[in-house]
Image (cartoon, helix red, strand yellow):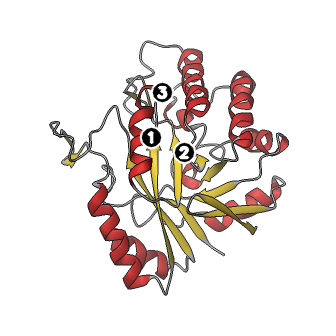
């Protein structure tokens, strides 16, 4: 069974890949199931109906998913292609502690199959622009990142898996921060994730970003398993045709090598286990 559980479309501010084209391409790739997980990042982006001015970056709106249009388009493509591929409704929530109330309200508004909880910004500062890292030492920005993640998982529970847990390394110009330095934070975070019945994802975009290790790292994946974690999804973090479904089969083999037995899909926020 081949699935991709981290897929972005035109409804994300950083993609122009139409939802229908994503579905058609996924069918062409032989995928059995996909979950669309477009971006919502309160604090740095606004809702289309918020009444606030929508700014543009490189011609694309700095706005969250257009929820009514998204849900309608999901139903349309599911009606057209549902006999050929399973299409699940998800989103990627870029949560910060001060934006939790907005995500709680959004989660109550719509029926979701799957939610990725990601830390995309801290203090409304982006990683990819280096705004968050500027003025901090490597230790300071790495520890602050994991501190925010810990606070979020302590307070926010309406999600399925923790996305690309060590995302900060993708934008760390100083190199990979030693695992032993973040292990105490990671262990505390993962204990909460496991106790809450949530999971983590293996994000295969580490390949296209040229990272020396998986995302999350082998050390983090082993720690998760050692602590009793068993819920894990696999996603490409696709934003374009070349990304979709990339390295999914390799990720399954990699997880087996690390001692995992299953991967998960989701329906109505409940995990479904499949043998790797």
Q: Residues within 10 Å of mark 2 (few under 14, many from 20)?
A: some
Q: Residue at x 73, y 42 (%)?
A: 194
26 or 196, nearer to the observer: 196
**Label located before the other in sequence (3 or 1):** 3
Label 2 close to label 1 by CB (< 8 Å): yes
Element type at mark 1:
helix
Residue 232 vs residue 69: left or right?
right
The N terminus: image quadrant: bottom right
Q: Residue furthest front?
A: 108
**Label located before the other in sequence (3 or 2):** 3
Element type at mark 3:
helix
Total marks placed: 3
Give the labeled residue for mark 1: 104
Q: Measure how far apart labels 2 and 1 are at the Cα level.
A: 7 Å
Per the rendering, the mark at residue 97 is: 3
Q: Residue at x 45, y 60 (%)?
A: 111
Q: Residue at x 56, y 15 (%)?
A: 140
Q: Position of residue 147 (x, y in %)?
A: 59, 22
Label 3 close to label 2 by CB (< 8 Å): no
Q: Measure how far apart labels 3 and 2 are at the Cα level.
A: 14 Å
């Amino acid at each position: 069974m081949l699935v991709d559980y981290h897929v972005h479309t035109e409804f994300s501010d950083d993609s122009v890949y139409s939802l229908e084209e994503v579905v058609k391409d996924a069918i062409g790739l032989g995928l059995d199931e996909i979950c669309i997980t477009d971006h919502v990042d309160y604090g740095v982006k606004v809702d289309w109906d918020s009444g606030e001015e929508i700014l543009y970056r490189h011609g694309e709106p700095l706005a969250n998913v257009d929820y009514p249009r998204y849900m309608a388009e999901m139903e349309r493509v599911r009606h057209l292609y549902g006999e050929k591929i399973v299409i699940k409704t998800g989103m990627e929530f870029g949560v910060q502690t001060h934006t939790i109330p907005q995500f709680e309200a959004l989660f109550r508004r719509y029926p979701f199959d799957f939610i990725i909880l990601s830390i995309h910004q801290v203090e409304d500062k982006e990683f990819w622009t280096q705004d968050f890292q500027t003025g901090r030492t490597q230790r300071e920005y790495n520890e602050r990142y994991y501190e925010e993640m810990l606070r979020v998982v302590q307070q926010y529970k309406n999600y399925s898996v923790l996305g690309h847990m060590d995302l900060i390394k993708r934008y760390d110009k100083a190199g990979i921060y030693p695992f032993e330095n973040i292990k105490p934070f990671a262990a505390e975070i993962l204990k909460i994730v496991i106790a809450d019945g949530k999971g983590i994802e293996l994000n295969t975009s580490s390949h296209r970003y040229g990272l020396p290790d998986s995302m999350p790292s082998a050390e983090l994946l082993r720690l998760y398993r050692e602590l009793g974690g068993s819920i894990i999804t696999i996603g490409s973090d696709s934003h374009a045709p070349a990304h979709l479904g990339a390295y999914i089969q390799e990720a399954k083999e990699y997880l087996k090598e690390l001692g995992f037995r299953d991967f998960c899909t989701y329906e109505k926020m409940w995990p479904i286990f499949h043998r790797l």
